[in-house]
Amino acid sequence: MTTARMPSGTFRRRAAAPPRQLVPRHSALVRITHWVNVFCFSLLLMTGAQIFNAHPRLYWGEYGADNDHAWLSVDSLQSSGHWRGAVHLGSLTFESTGLLGASNENGALAPRGFPAWLTVPSYQDLAAGRRWHFFFAWLFAINGAVYLVGGLVKRHFGRDLLPTRAELAPAHLVREVVDHAKLDFPKGEAARRYNVLQKLTYMAVAFVLLPLMVLTGLTMSPGLDSAFHILLDVFGGRPSARSIHFICASLLVAFVVVHVLMVLVSGVWNNLRSMITGRYAIELDGDPR
Amino acid sequence: MNPNVKFKSGAMTPFQARRRWLTAFAAGAGGLALAGCDKAVNNPRIDATLRSAEKLTFASQRLILDHQPLAKEYGERDLSPVFRANGSMMPASKEYARLLQGGFVDFRLQVDGLVQRPQALSLAQLKTMKARTQITRHDCVEGWSAIGKWQGVPLAQVLDLAGLKPGARYVIFHCADNLGESADDSGLYYESIDLLDAYHPQTILAYGMNGKDLPVAHGAPLRLRIERQLGYKQAKYVNRIEVVDAYSHLNGGKGGFWEDRGYEWYAGI
């Protein structure tokens, strides 16, 4: 290729591609709160796994301890000197040695719920896990409050997140789902805005899952429970709140997996740049300017 | 602007530079997260910063709990079928064995420190005082919960009987169990609360559980119930109450057995 040696090769090659235009995509509010959230969520997840390991059993109701029925438990069993891990979900049992219930710690299988590489700190230390969890919970909650207030004031929710009536039409939703499954993403003018699946997902995360994380977290505090009995009534008890906290965290992990996957397949550099500098490149397909 | 002038052969274009920067940023963040966390946990300055959130938690909960709301009380049907016992199950001292053998007839609760009238109260004396019964939830720091029925004397009555001296700020609970299994007294369980929690109506010295005498595994003959905090504050085998102006001179100086081992002094969360 002759252009490769030319001093301005990159620019020439870019010129050969469809014309692109950098458009403002994410406001400073969204960018900053997004990355603070990434940082907080990562640490909350890993310190949360540390806290879960102190009692890797989940219950429904107002009480729940070792003798009570757990709907989910990560068990560490010892047979002939070796540790074995098993997950009990309802009446189902899964062998999970190596990942859950028993995993590598200093070269040998040790009894622990989540493995060392998933917890902060890596070794068992509930006190440190709690200290970290609550510090980043404060940061996370303050960050979330800034996002919610800023989003209302700057009309981010109404303008960018609220789907239009046309977008919610079943035929449109079906087409979006099919396009997504084919990894066929909006281009040109349509790429300036979130598509309806993004809007619905981001709204579910920002207005349902993350607030539920905060509220169920607060319900686990005996101090707050005494001030707000309603928390216990709404979630059905402290053990229930702990279960919902775990379920919502799992759903958020599922969201992050799909979200990162979508970022990767729909133009990783363009997406990353738009969440850092705010500018997003759209292709002006067949629309010369 | 002519790009040929600014970007010589081999130099990075803005796009490439930004990519390289982003890659380095992502790799750095990932590496820091995986390798650096244990180091960060053990860094005293980071630890001190993280502990500042405890003060924020304490201050905001105090703001919310200033009017002394009661912890939720449950009904008989809500009781845990089995109430898990935790920590010490049976103090090892000869003195405790002797008292247990005698049905705690010789047991005396010492009340001293910054009080006008130091006391030595027998179980029978405590039982003649006005009692309170409450069915409440016990929340362990590990994450499990159990509901039990507690009967005992409000701590406020005992403190009023002794009469606080000026300067009194905290109540220390000295216990008979050596959970630290130390050769000396340094492993003895102890706890401390401030006067706001000490005078809360649900803060009681319980001698009865689920309609019977308090079992040994749950702290016989006397344990603390402080219903708005976690399990490790609910000191078992309490044999001495000391009123103080500060707790920093005791053992690890953090105000409790588990506090000396890294846990928060304020356990309302």
Image (cartoon, coloured by chain):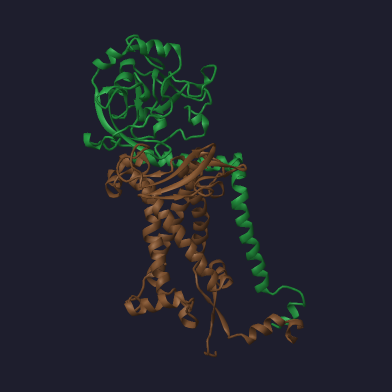
Chain colours: A brown, B green
Q: Is residue A105 left or right of residue B159?
A: right
Image x and y of residue A225, in percent: 32, 41
Task: Give above or below for B219 relative to A144.
Answer: above
Q: Classify the position of the N terminus of chain A by image quarter.
A: bottom right
- Number of marks present in the image shown: 0
Asked whether residue A114 is in view, the answer is yes
Residue at the spot 31% in from the left edge and 19% down from the top edge: B158
Image x and y of residue A240, in percent: 33, 47
Q: Classify the position of the C terminus of chain A by image quarter.
A: bottom right
Location of residue B115 by image quarter: top left
Asked whether residue B118 is in view, the answer is no
Image x and y of residue B247, in percent: 48, 24
Location of residue B134 by image quarter: top left
Task: Give above or below for A287 relative to B137.
Answer: below
- Outermost residue on the front side: it is A80
Q: As rendered, which of B168 and B193 lies closer to the eye? A: B193
Image x and y of residue A170, in percent: 32, 77
Residue at the spot 53% in from the left edge and 50% down from the top edge: A118
